[in-house]
Every structure is written in structure tokens, then in C-alpha cells.
Image (spheres, coloured by chain):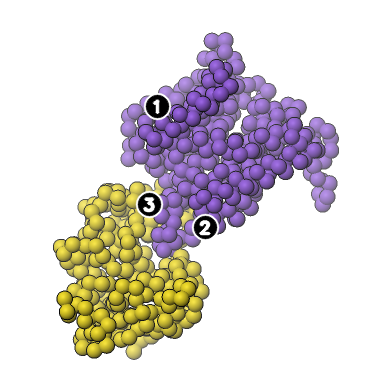
Amino acid sequence: MARPVVTRLVLWGALVLLLALPPLVQGLGADFAVGVATRVLIFALVGVSLNLILGYGGMVSFGHAAFFGAGAYVVAILAQHDTQGEPLVTWPIVIDGTQSALIAWPAAMVVSALLALVIGLIALRTSGLYFIMITLAFAQMLYFLFISLRAYGGEDGLSLFARSAAGPLDLADDVHFYYLVLGFVLLALWIKRRLVASRFGRALRGIRDNERRMQALGFPTFRYKLAAFVMAGAVAGLSGALIANQTEFVSPSFLDWQRSGEILVIVILGGMGRVYGPVAGAVAFLLLEEVLSAWTDHWMLVLGPILVLVVLFAKGGIWSLIERGETTDG
Amino acid sequence: MADPLLEIEGLSKAFGAVVACDAVTLSLREGEVHAMIGPNGAGKTTLLGQLTGEIRPDAGRIRFAGEDVTGLPEHARAGRGLARSFQVTSLFSRFTALDNVALAVQAQAGHSFRFWRPAARETALVAPARAALARVGLAERADVPAAALAHGEQRQLEIAMALASGPRLLLLDEPTAGMGHEDSGRMIALLSALKAEGRMTILLIEHDMDVVFALADRITVLVYGQTIATGVPEEIRANSEVRRAYLGEEAAA
């Protein structure tokens, strides 16, 4: 099915705007906006990852910040070992720290994916409210673990000496970093569109709508849910690696339950089960935060009613105002 | 005679003090339409649940096509050719009729760890799905979301989904439940046509005696979890115990 004209216009317009943003804002003398936009895109990426399991898999994970924060910590911890010249592990093999993006970022994805595998193996045996509670509980366990790790800054967190080294790209340059993050977001969106329309995506959506029937049809539903959960964890880990680079600082607050809540809000605000929804959600959420928090510390007072209105009147989130129905075409 | 397709031996299941299934023994011949009747609460749906693997029996064995499937999970039994339709319509309401059936085809087409090709353009999924829709008379309604179909059409779609996997044994849980006279007549015609093809064995759980006597080769009567009689329709009609326990209500009415 062809996309409606309006959707195409919005998508192409957004793409052009995102590509042209750095020179545009620099021309206006608002260089700081590149950093803000990068942050928005990173949260869009973590939203895209949560949307896979929440919007297409019906798994309401209230612990997504665990994977996000773990990814951030992997980058920060590897970097700290590198700057201090101490190996991370000395037995049975020596693993040195590193500041290379080519090693640290995939490592962040792998660690978050493994974490998702372990948490998923247990949490996915439950559903509904219990699933929400158990994912929350795991994320909080990880939160308190990092608070107690004095070697990695405990409650105070850990500063990065510099952004990761990424070959020809100079990540210390905000514009380079912005385009790299944008590239990741576009790649993730493209992969997700293919994914939800594939056999795997259909199975996942079927499980969301009627798991009992899926089992009766002959689908071993647990393994598909687990696979989606692990994929979402890996992409959240990459987002975490990016946010650690963006802020050059990590702390346990990266993985507390409020952060999980924010990621949920981004997806719900933008539109569950809409591929581009989380991008719209991240833009809306972070820009509202940016604008309102300059005006009052109690900016949540304004966000709350907006969220209520969206949930009541635009059930598919912001993206449903642009496109009706969920995104399922390839 | 050939080996029975399905053999149930001493199957029992209790929920607390309620014995829903009491040492049920039953065998289904390949190619027959076997109806199971009995008053409300006789344990018909519990028996069906144990056959599909949804409910674990307390005791007894189930053999399907010569293999003991008692310990197999639901999806593994479906993979061996056991399909069911639900008493209460259980569809993927946001999916179109075609996609509902395509999902049933996909279930039997190997694993679904295929992440890249759009499933909607896979002939291997879409062609059998269209064929199954045509068999139940829903070809014209392929692109309508399941939620927007009429009740009778949703029941037909249920059957199409069960057919799509090319099952050896079809378990039908009250296929005419909640249907008006006209819809129910159409369902009987559809099931008769399937029976005439002779490719499947059907276990039919049904309340409506018109449906049962129109389709069944043999009938088993279940009362309070126990089988009180099995036989061809004439024998069941003539059986005094059955008349007392069950048919009497109808005869009086």
C-alpha cells in the first residue's frame, strides 16, 4: 500500500530539516541547538527500541533504562580503565580499557543484550502488571548496584575524559557527533520498518493481539518475545553509549525508574506501534522539557495534562495525527 | 481396520472437587466426523483443552497418529497436524481476514526468525491463505479487518485459519455458537463440503442437534465428565440412557 501524501511530505520534510539543522542553527548563532538536537535523537533511538517491544510486542517494560544505563556505563567504565591504564579484567585473559567507539559501542550493545536476555528469561514468564513490576524491579536492582560501586563513582557517577574515538570522525565536534547519531536513528528506523513487516514482525504483532491464539496456531511465543526483548535491549545499549558520549558523564540516575518512565512517555506520546512515533515523541517531550523548564522548575505540571490529553484524544499518539493505523508495511 | 488417528485413554482432570473429565476413553478413526455432545458443564471444552495441550490432564494418555503427545506443549501438537477453532471467536482483530489466515499458514511454515522480507509479499504465505479463504467462502472479504466482519463471517474465518495449516485433525468447538438459522445453515453446508473432501478427521463439539445429526458419522455422549455412549447417530438416538440424560430435554421441548 502506498503511503498517503501527507505522511510522505512530513517524512521528507523532517529528513531535510534534520540534515540541514547544524548549518541552519549555526547560521542563526544558536550553536547549542546542535547539542539539544543530538540529545533528542538519542532519546528517539531509545524510544524506537522500546517501541519494538511495547508498541509491536505488547510488552510494557518499565525497566528500559536498565539497558540504556548499562550501555552508558560500559562506555564510561572502559574509558576510565583506559585513561588510568589499568586493565578491566586480568584473569583469565587481560581485557584493557578502551576509548575506541568501534570496540566500546558494540560492547555496550552486547552487554545490554545479554542483560536483556537474562532479565527477559525471567520477566517474560509473567505478563501484564507482573511484567511491569518485574522489569521495574530488575532496573532498580541495577540502579542500586551502580550506586554501591565506589570504584565507578557510586552515587556521584563517572566523568568521561573525552568522547569515544571513531576513526576519521571527530566526535568532539558536535556537528560530527550529531550526524553520526542521526545516521544511527535513520538506520534503526529503516531496520524497524523492515522488521515489523517481516514474518518475525507479524508473529510479534500476533502475540501482542492474541497470545493464546498464537500458541494454538503453533507459534512458540516465548522465544519470539525474548528475541524482540533482546534486540530492544541491544539498541537501548547503543543509545546509552551515545548519551554517555553526549554528556561525557554517567551516573546511576541514567538507569533509575524515572528514566524508564520518561522513555515510556516518549513512546506513548509519539505513538505506540508507529515506526516514526518515538521520534515525534522525543521531539515533543524534550523540547517541552527544554522550553518549560526554563520557565518553571515544575514543568511536569504542564507536561502531565498534555499527556492526559494525548492519551484521551489521540490514542495513537502524535503520529496518529499524521498517519492513521499502525505502521506495518515494508 | 486402520489404526485410529486419535486415541484417548483414561483421561482425567479435576478442578478442585469438580471432576470435569473422568477416565474418558475415546478413539477417532481416520476420516470420520465424530461429534461430542453433552449438557452444559459435561466437560466437553475441558476435554478439548486437554487434546490441544492447553490443559494438563491429571491422568491418562493421548495418542495422535501413533505418537504419545500427552506431554507435548500446545504449539508442538499444532505442528503435528492438530488444529482447533475456538468456541468464542478468537481472531486477530486488527489484522485483515487474509492476514489472519496468512498468520496461520506462517505458523506451520518453519520458524519465524525471518526479519527482512515483507511477509505480505511472500507468495508462500499469501497463496495458501487465499485458497483457505476461498474454501470457506470469504474470498471477497480478504482485505476487511477481522473486527469489521459479521459474526457469521468471523466463524467462517476461524475455520479458514484452522484449515490453513492443512491439519489431519480438526477440533471444532461449537462452530455454530451464537449463530442465527441462516448462518448456521451456511456453516453446516461448509462443514459438509469439508467432510466430502475426506482429507480430514473432525472432532465436533456441538450443542445444536441439527448440526450434529447432519454431519456426524459417530457420536459420543459426555455427561458429568464420563462418556455414557458412543455410536452411530441411530444408536445414540435409540439409547435410553442418552435419551434420559440429554436428548430427553429436546424431545420434551
| Residue under the point 63% across and 31% down | A243
**Discs 1, 2: same chain:** yes
Q: Position of residue B160 (x, y in %)?
A: 29, 61
Discs 3, 1 touching: Cβ within 8 Å: no
Which residue lies most toward the front here? Answer: B17
Disc 1 from disc 2: Cα separation: 37 Å
The quadrant of the picture occupied by the N terminus of chain A is: top left
Q: Nearer the viewer, residue B32 or B125?
A: B32
Q: Give amino acid for label 2.
A: Phe
Q: Disc 3 and disc 2: Cα gap in Å? A: 24 Å
User: Chain ID for label 1?
Assistant: A
Task: Give the camera-side residue of A238 and B117.
Answer: A238
Q: Is residue A217 left or right of residue B174?
A: right
Secondary structure found at label 2: helix
Residue indicated by mark 3? B122
Question: In the image, what residue occupies the spot 17% across and 79% down?
Answer: B252
What is chain A's hue in the picture?
purple
Q: Which residue is mark 1?
A: A10
Q: Nearer the viewer, residue A306 or B6?
A: A306
- Residue A201 position within the rendered picture, expressed as x and y whole percent measured from the top left: 45, 48
Q: Would residue A22 be found to the left or right of residue B118 on screen?
A: right
Q: Which chain is yellow?
A: B
Q: Earlier in the sequence, mark 1 or mark 2?
A: 1
* Helix, strand or loop at mark 3: loop
Specify the amino acid type for callout 1: Val
Q: Are marks 3 and 2 in contact (CB under 8 Å)?
A: no
What residue type is disc 3 on? Glu
- Residue A261 in the image: above or below residue A210: above
Kindly indicate the quadrant of the structure image that contains residue A217: bottom left
